[in-house]
Amino acid sequence: MNRSLNEHVAQLVSEASDGAVTPDEALSASVPLPALGVTSLAQMRLIDALEREYGVEVDLGTDVSHLESVAALAAFVESKR
Amino acid sequence: MNPQAIRVAFEGGGEGRGPLTWGQRAIWETVEATAPDDHYFNFGHVLAVPRAAWPLTPQSAAAAVSGLVERHPALRTTTPEGRGQVVHGRGELTAEIVTAEPGEGTKTATELLERLKRRRFDYAAEWPLRAGLVTSPSGVVTHLVLVYCHMAVDGLGAEIVLRDLRLLLIKGRVAGTLPATPLELALWQESEQGRRVAQAAEDYWEGEFLRVPASMFPAPAAEVEGPPIWRAVLTSHAAEAAARHAAARYSTSAGAVLLVGACAMTSALTGLSRCAMLPIVGNRFRADTRAAVTTLSQESLFTLDVTDGGRLTMAGLLTTAKPALLRAYRYGFHDPAGRAAATARASEARGEQVRPYCCFNDMRFADPPAELSDAAEVRDALTRSTLAWPLSQEQLNCRFCVHVSGEGGALALSLTADTRYVPKEAMERWLSGLEMFLMEAAFGDGSAVSALRRAG
């Protein structure tokens, strides 16, 4: 996996949560991001940031597991680019 | 009391005119539906003058208010007939000055706030901000009172205004870049990108309106004597703690647990396995709206399937609700005209008017962080829950309105309903069912959602 993409996504997670989650915590999390304190508002901010920065459209279908970790988010972005 | 006034002149801000934003149009629709009682939407703040700004003269207070109006175009924008917005570059408003008796400053300021809220705004000819000053008998300003027209700001926008007013009082200026203005937002919404966002939202509303019950409360169930609209408020410390426990347990927010709980209980109450509820959403998740001083809150549409209620698990319910919740947040940012078109098409396709008559407004600004008391303590708090019936009236534009607010460490769960469709005893059952739902979500074994039987 692209290391710098993961790091950038982790940075966006941190910004979306107003710093409640640090980039390092987001990168090394062993639980889903919401369990770290990424609220639904922060999730929506994160989606907005990913869509703006990578020009992708984040799917909000029945499965949103791609929003639950930095690795899954980065893989999602990679697959859509 | 000795009413006087001071002029607050402002100039140097940009001016312009353009269409209304989606948020402004949404408010305008409710204003039109409510007029002449639209003063109902007026709201405001009392700001006790920060110690760092003491002693404050009326002239300095007026200068701070004028700096505020210059900074935020929303506060100098008129919306004649709801047809568009006109941003004025210069103007003057009048701030009333009231002298309080010694020790009565806060009381006097609150009375002034209520008085300034009472009158409806003239959207064409009046500034959307009313200001007032309360002084001590020696003429020092102790409190500033601001009352807003809802076409100008919503609750979160007003919080930013208040923060900036404090800075202007203390430092005389506000640092930092200006957020997007309502006019810039309106022009973006008309752009190709904005239309794409609007179209996606319109598709969502239409798709959901084709599959949800046309109304959650389609037929009157009872005849009533006297005013049919009643409000019941359950004030519960246990619910507040339980919602936070449940949020931590299921990695979600207390607001989400409350909305899902409200939907699940409404399904149980109506016997409809799919619930459509219209929550008010803040629309502040976008980079360009996050700190905007304007009115952004809009109604969205949240739908939840509560099928197979007998075997439903709490985790199943709260987990399946997550994507639906995110969709509701995303598509709450919508063009009201697109929503109206989607509603009309869905209604025509179904041969019946689609209108859920079921809404939800979580009026708390933020979920407080989890402060975990143990289960036994929270269960004990159940005995302190109280139910009151503070309001009855003749008319309401809805049949089932849920309001959530914080009340000194408790949650005030308010249900305003048309008792021809939802009898009073069903309202009580729904509220106590919701409290039980929250307790189960927080402390139950998660194997079933027994609370659903309480409301059903």
Image (cartoon, coloured by chain):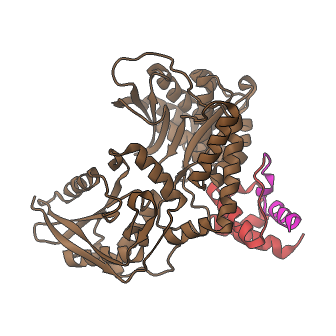
| Residue B130 shows in the view | yes
Q: Is residue A74 magenta?
A: yes
* Residue at 31% over, 73% down: B65
Task: Name the side, left or right, on which A3 lies relative to B402.
Answer: right
Give the position of the C terminus of chain B as an image quadrant. top right
Our reading of the magenta stretch's main secondary structure is helix
Direction from residue A71 to residue B141 in the image, left or right: left
> Number of marks in the image?
0
Residue B91: image location, x then y, percent: 30, 75
Q: Who's the residue at 57% across and 23% down the image?
A: B455
From what the image shows, is residue B16 above or below residue B27? below
> Which chain can be seen in brown?
B
Where, quadrant-wise, is the N terminus of chain B in this rendering? Answer: bottom left
Task: Say if residue B318 shows up in the picture.
Answer: no
Residue closest to the eye, B220 or B50: B220
In-front residue for pair B339/A52: B339
Write down the colour of chain A: red
In percent of the image, x 78 and y 45: which residue is there? A62
| In front of the other: B89 or B149 | B89
Q: Is residue A12 above or below residue B33?
A: below
Query: What segment carries the magenta color?
Result: A62-81
Q: Position of residue B409 (x, y in %)?
A: 44, 45
Which of the 4 image quadrants contains residue B288?
bottom right
- Does residue B78 lie above or below B376 as drawn? below
Q: Residue at x 79, y 63 (%)?
A: A70
**Residue B329 covered by magenta stretch:** no
